[in-house]
Amino acid sequence: MAKFTRRYNRKRIGLSPGSIDHITTSSENYSISAYCYGEDILEKKELVNPSDLEKLLSSKKGSVWININGLNTSIVDQICSSYKIHPLFVEDILHLGQRPKLEEGENYLFLVLNMINFDTIKDEVIHEQVSIIFNQEFIISFQELEGDVFDPVRLRLEAGKGKIRKSGTDYLAYALLDVIVDRFYLVLEQLGNKIEMLEEKVLDDPSIELLYEINRLKRDFILLRKNIWPLREVLNSLMNNDMTIVSAHTRVFIKDVYDHTIQVMDSIDTYREMLSSILDIYMSSISNRQNDVMKTLTIIATIFIPLTFLVGVYGMNFRVMPELDWEYGYYTVWGIMIIVGLSLLLYFKRKNWM
Amino acid sequence: MAKFTRRYNRKRIGLSPGSIDHITTSSENYSISAYCYGEDILEKKELVNPSDLEKLLSSKKGSVWININGLNTSIVDQICSSYKIHPLFVEDILHLGQRPKLEEGENYLFLVLNMINFDTIKDEVIHEQVSIIFNQEFIISFQELEGDVFDPVRLRLEAGKGKIRKSGTDYLAYALLDVIVDRFYLVLEQLGNKIEMLEEKVLDDPSIELLYEINRLKRDFILLRKNIWPLREVLNSLMNNDMTIVSAHTRVFIKDVYDHTIQVMDSIDTYREMLSSILDIYMSSISNRQNDVMKTLTIIATIFIPLTFLVGVYGMNFRVMPELDWEYGYYTVWGIMIIVGLSLLLYFKRKNWM
Amino acid sequence: MAKFTRRYNRKRIGLSPGSIDHITTSSENYSISAYCYGEDILEKKELVNPSDLEKLLSSKKGSVWININGLNTSIVDQICSSYKIHPLFVEDILHLGQRPKLEEGENYLFLVLNMINFDTIKDEVIHEQVSIIFNQEFIISFQELEGDVFDPVRLRLEAGKGKIRKSGTDYLAYALLDVIVDRFYLVLEQLGNKIEMLEEKVLDDPSIELLYEINRLKRDFILLRKNIWPLREVLNSLMNNDMTIVSAHTRVFIKDVYDHTIQVMDSIDTYREMLSSILDIYMSSISNRQNDVMKTLTIIATIFIPLTFLVGVYGMNFRVMPELDWEYGYYTVWGIMIIVGLSLLLYFKRKNWM
Amino acid sequence: MAKFTRRYNRKRIGLSPGSIDHITTSSENYSISAYCYGEDILEKKELVNPSDLEKLLSSKKGSVWININGLNTSIVDQICSSYKIHPLFVEDILHLGQRPKLEEGENYLFLVLNMINFDTIKDEVIHEQVSIIFNQEFIISFQELEGDVFDPVRLRLEAGKGKIRKSGTDYLAYALLDVIVDRFYLVLEQLGNKIEMLEEKVLDDPSIELLYEINRLKRDFILLRKNIWPLREVLNSLMNNDMTIVSAHTRVFIKDVYDHTIQVMDSIDTYREMLSSILDIYMSSISNRQNDVMKTLTIIATIFIPLTFLVGVYGMNFRVMPELDWEYGYYTVWGIMIIVGLSLLLYFKRKNWM
Amino acid sequence: MAKFTRRYNRKRIGLSPGSIDHITTSSENYSISAYCYGEDILEKKELVNPSDLEKLLSSKKGSVWININGLNTSIVDQICSSYKIHPLFVEDILHLGQRPKLEEGENYLFLVLNMINFDTIKDEVIHEQVSIIFNQEFIISFQELEGDVFDPVRLRLEAGKGKIRKSGTDYLAYALLDVIVDRFYLVLEQLGNKIEMLEEKVLDDPSIELLYEINRLKRDFILLRKNIWPLREVLNSLMNNDMTIVSAHTRVFIKDVYDHTIQVMDSIDTYREMLSSILDIYMSSISNRQNDVMKTLTIIATIFIPLTFLVGVYGMNFRVMPELDWEYGYYTVWGIMIIVGLSLLLYFKRKNWM
């Protein structure tokens, strides 16, 4: 639950906005990498501290991509101030739990996004905040956690194939967004597998744990939906905003990513419908079992209660009970009881209770 | 389930867009047919490979319709590149699982659609992706699977009756769209029959299999809805876009197809309401049966438990029990028991439990 | 169910649009009546075939209203072609199951509507397709079935009272629409009566037939809603379209009909809410009865099972059982049993189970 | 139920619009009062028939407010025709069951509204139709029933305090609307009290009558909602229409009434949510009681059935049954039975069933 | 419940608007504090009565912030009239239960808001009405209750850090709004904790009190939603209105608060979904327990009823019953009974009932 409210703690309330003194997290593990690239050039550097960055940039040719893994407060602060990023945006980068959004800075665009992932060990969906700042000259990406998510983009950049080296930073921004949206497909696949497993289990073993599982999955889909929905809006604004930072050429590609988010939303809706079907079947299965129990009780009780009454009759101690003295009285009673029992069994069979 | 996520596999993530190296399917079975037609001419050719196509086209008169059955990667690629189709659209043609959409190319319109069908053998709704590219001069259609879906259009073309030969490629595009939307009616009819069968079964035999069936149908309707909804949008854009590719004359016909999609959506909604009615009755029928079981148990138990008590009384071995020595004690007890039993039966009758 | 899909049969698919060779119905029973009317004139004629019509029209003064009862293909075709109606509209007139809509022809307006009615014998809502074509000079109405629905309009026309003779064909079109919308009130009244009957029955006799009845009514309201909703849109377009066919004077009256459709929709919503209330009560009533059964069983079993145990104790054959030899043992046991039984009864009373 | 369809009866269908021959109600009890008022003047007159009105008006100074209590057909007709009100509006005034709406006449505004009230004797929400016609010179209000609803406005008018005498007829119209919207608060308060009573009863006595009560309240809120919703639209149009009848000064006050309708809608929504909570608790409470019954049965049966079996064993008549001859056999059996009984009780206690 | 209707009491209805004679509350405990501040100056004063205020203001330099704690009618009236606030706004300040809204006065903006808080002692969410009036020169805030909510703003003002002293009154207004929105996070955190507690309890102890708790929380979230929704609209208007009172510089910050309200709404939705999950599990848990009860009954009854029948058989007193005379008859019967009992137990085990 912490996820929903993690942005705020009591101490922060009333703080001056843009103040980064009391942010919630500051990772000590961070890494900075910088790429200077163009159609013919590619320079890559792992940096230890931001001051090295300035050296690199002074001699820069082509476009620059700086990627920061791990949100160290002072590092983020230094880089942002050297690029004159608005303090509110710096605050957004550092405070986790942002809603995806696109903001226009003075001469740059600022994006906050949530990248999702499926942690197969903990068996749960995890979120990671990614911020991207770019204009025609540079692109800076901040990742909450260390990770190799952007590796495919790096590979394409280093291989120099495709359009990525020839196109500007806006195209690189598109490439990063594409990778982030593609993550949703992977997570959907994992959750889809879980749903299939639930579908199989629901009839065989409708335990209350299954209900928990169903509800956990439901919540996962709600979270996915909450993340993809504003992401779609972000992409829509990117496609339609009138700043010159995003070229017409790149907008076509962003439209493609946008289509993917709609597809993801469709899938999410379908999965949610499937979950509610499973819930229906779960409920029905439970009530079916209850019915089974009831039927068993009814069959046994309905057969033996009358018979017990009958043997009770001949257990009475009346002085005058002619049947007791009959030669075949005992056997007659057995006969009657067998007939009664069998007819009841037949009746239940006919009623489809057995 | 594969359907919802089939577009993406891990390897693809991060690939350069428009690259067709790693598409999900490439059919080896394909066929290409080409029609050159006009008011007075009709030339038809089955092609083995795309190069034959160019020969044909060089001598072309009138409009050209090329139909490709089976999505072979290289074939699609060749044809598209000879018509200068945007790489992203080629990717869309080849990657299955697209959401229906209309895109404007430089001088052509690009449509991706899902054609549905009811596989009576597998007893399920199947989807097939159809892509259409057209401008005033040519129209190219790509079908995922071999099939005779467009045969009615071919027949009309060959017969030369109606407007189809006199009108341009936009009218042919309309004819194809009309055929695709008509498919929905056929599938709705099949599903409608299934619903009627369910309606009959739900009272007689409310098994849990029926619930599965209901949920499968529900899902089918969700899928239909997910396909018809964007199709409606596509038709709406075709009707209202301001490119000159679609003539005013054809727009009237497209409006007609558009009306059909709305009718289909209405029917889908009605069927869904019917399904939820059936679900209501199913639940009620289940609980009715449970009630029947309970009533049987109650009637039997309520009659015999007091009687068993009574015979138990006279089975006691007290030394002093005057009734036991009465001449007609035994018969009196029987009399009492019959009276008690009958009055209980009457009581249940009056309560409407029998 | 046929209603939802009746428009299409397999053979039609792929047919040239506007072709009327394969329409679903062609009534042999038809009648044509024509009115030529103006402020001072009124000529009425029953026609046998459309050619008579032309004679009549050649000498026409004032406005013309032609009403066709029964959809005979060739008749409809002749009339429409003499008025140059677009083939797609002719197809719409002849194919039943249209969604209400308003289309603009070259110099006329085309309306398709569904008139509803309550068949008191079959006890169900029936639908009839009505098409109206009009411009400033003529108005043509097509009814699917023979009927006297438009009689009130005829009477007013013949009586010459009110504005109907003085106003143009657009006012007559309004008059017909008014009659059609008024039908909804009649049907709502019938369905309202049925709901009241259900409300009374639901507590006394909550059988599964009642559930069927509730669901049938629900479906009726869904159908009504599906018909009134597009009708409202049609009226809205009539009110706001910018063609000169509908005069400002008539628009005020159409606004009045439009208000009625909104009132009808309100009533439909209210009835639907009432139905779902009845369903709630039905469910509750069923579960109440089940509860009654359970309570009866519990009371009887809970009283007699302990007593049966007690008499069982003194039915044991132990050699040493001092109570058996007591003078008043038997009576004491009876005393104990009566006390136990009464206290249990009291307990149930206090628990409100009796 | 009559309320929803009361506007129409069979005879009316097809009547000429605006004809007032066949209206549904014509009250014989009516009263007409007229106020001529301005900043310094106030003349008040109770009129017997409309002709007196003209006398009064000929000498009029300042604004005029005519209020008619009770809808007498001929009176309404006379007054409206002397002010040249459109016949359709006259029809609306006289036919009850109108949906609230605002219409623009030639040089006046026409409002139909529903005033609600809570009849504490019949314990139900009642509706009364109020129509208001006004321009800069006069305001006419028609009330369906005799009543003192507008008394507060009269008092303010007579007292001459506040802005009411200084402002024009549009301000008086506002004052009437304000009174009508305030009624909703009163009714909400009454219904709120009922909900609180239901909340208390639902746990103690969840009878089926309570369910009826809940459903009746639900319906009341639906009706309120259906009345406040179009009223809000009416106020919105009043605020934003571009006629000069409503002055900018008055629009600020109408905005205030508009805000109240939104508040009323908020409250209605909240109450409806509360009702559905109560329904949840009702259902739960019912099932709780059923559970109680079941537990009682289970406890008694589960304890005594095994014991009865045991005493049955020693009631058998086998020749050889060593236990029967033991000195303490009888006491041993009692011991065993007490131990079994107590352990079962303990088990139930631990399971939290007692 | 009083909360929803507290604005109106019978006496008020029909009162002249803007009259403050009959307001619902007038607190005797009030305090007035005034700040005159600028980049270099800060004067603070606690006032006893409003006349002192004028003295202070006559000598004012920089911006002025007047904060009134406790809504004393005459105080509010005096202050507002000295600033020429519209009487309707004064009424809004004094009447509690307003819906959050933004109104434009002649040369000022008027805001009514609801501040929420979690009363940990009463364990409930409480609401407090806050009104803010500001233009470029002054800002006046009215709080319903005494409280230290604005203390963080006061501290920042006194510390002189950040932008608060350098920016104008619009920035101060933003700071107050920020504090108010931040409160929602705190309350969400509290309610989130409660939900977590419910989640733990729902399986262990699904009592009906828990259901009450769930429904109370549901209602709390509805109230939160009802408060945050119009607040969002207010912020949106502040951001986008075209008055010059709010500077472009401040609008960026208001956008930030606006984003927070969207985040709050997201969290509320998520929590509501969680609550409905908990309700599902509650229902399931209840039915699970019922099932447990049923199973216990069925197992015991199904085992012992047949056995009791068997011992009943040998308790009969027939003269001829050969088994009774067998040497090992008694032991054979025990053997049979043990076998029957064990096989039934096995059967239940296999059916997963134990």
Image (cartoon, coloured by chain):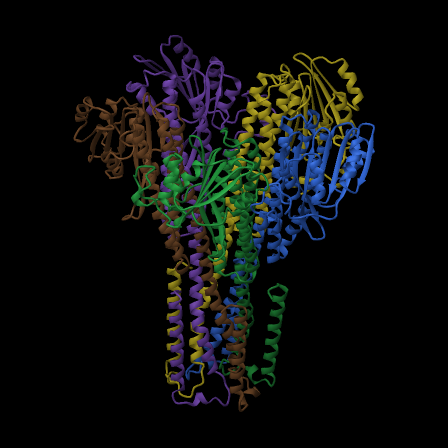
Chain colours: A brown, B green, C blue, D yellow, E purple
**Lateral position of residue C169 relative to residue E278, left or right:** right
Residue D281, placed above or below residue A149: below
Q: Which of A298 and D295 lies nearest the eye of the viewer?
A: A298
Percent across and percent down for residue E56 are 39, 11
Nearer the observer, C223 or E254: C223
x and y percentages locating residue B277 in the rendered image: 55, 52
Where's residue E80, x and y in %? 47, 16
Based on the displayed image, in which of its 4 quarters is residue E66 positioned? top left
Relative to residue B81, is residue D116 drawn left or right?
Answer: right
Q: Would residue A283 be found to the left or right of residue C211 on screen?
A: left
Residue at 61% across, 22% down:
D174
Q: Is residue E44 left or right of residue D290?
A: left
Farthest front residue in view: B59
User: Can residue A226 be seen in this snapshot?
Assistant: no
Residue farthest bottom in this picture: A327
In the rendered view, tell whether residue A260 sits above or below residue C303: above
Q: Position of residue D288 (x, y in %)?
A: 48, 55
Q: Residue C224: name its quadrant.
A: top right
